[in-house]
Amino acid sequence: MPASKPGMPMSKKSIIEATSLTRQTSRLELRPLALSDYRAWLQAHRTMEPPKSAFDPGPISEEKLNHARLRQGTG
């Protein structure tokens, strides 16, 4: 998406593109998690290492790893 010039309003198309949460390249798609991602999300959390810095929250407890947590997007 081309950047708009300073002081120039963005076009309606640019605003819509800027608010979309999905981005795709020839090799990769970035998107929010979907409920169909549950198994991969669960496996990633189950194999997460302990925190390595004060900014790393570390793994989520096993009893909190459920579909509701995935839908919240908090983990």
Image: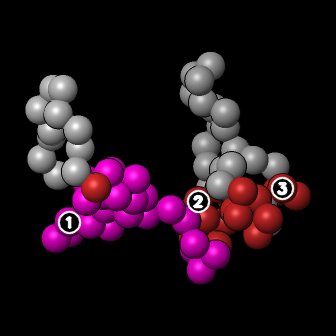
Q: Is residue 32 magenta?
A: yes
What is the number of callouts on the image?
3
Residue pictured at 61% horizontal, 65% vertical: 41
Return the residue at label 2.
Answer: 44
Instruction: Determine if residue 39 is in view.
Output: no
The magenta stretch is: 13-37
Residues at marks 1 and 2, CA–CA distance in whole angstroms: 24 Å
Q: Quadrant of residue 38?
A: bottom right
Up the image or down, 7 lies above or below 22; here it is above
Residue pictured at 11% horizontal, 32% vertical: 5
Local packing at callout 3 (Cα closer than 10 Å; few below 14, some 14-19, many 20+) is: few
Amino acid found under the numbered disc labelled 3: Lys
Q: Residue furthest right?
A: 63
Instruction: Determine if residue 40 is in view.
Output: yes
Return the residue at label 3.
Answer: 64
Labels 1, 3: front one: 1
Secondary structure beneath label 1: loop
Mark before the other along the chain sequence, 1 or 3: 1
Residues at marks 3 and 2, CA–CA distance in whole angstroms: 14 Å
Mark before the other along the chain sequence, 3 or 2: 2
Return the residue at label 1.
Answer: 25
Mark before the other along the chain sequence, 1 or 2: 1
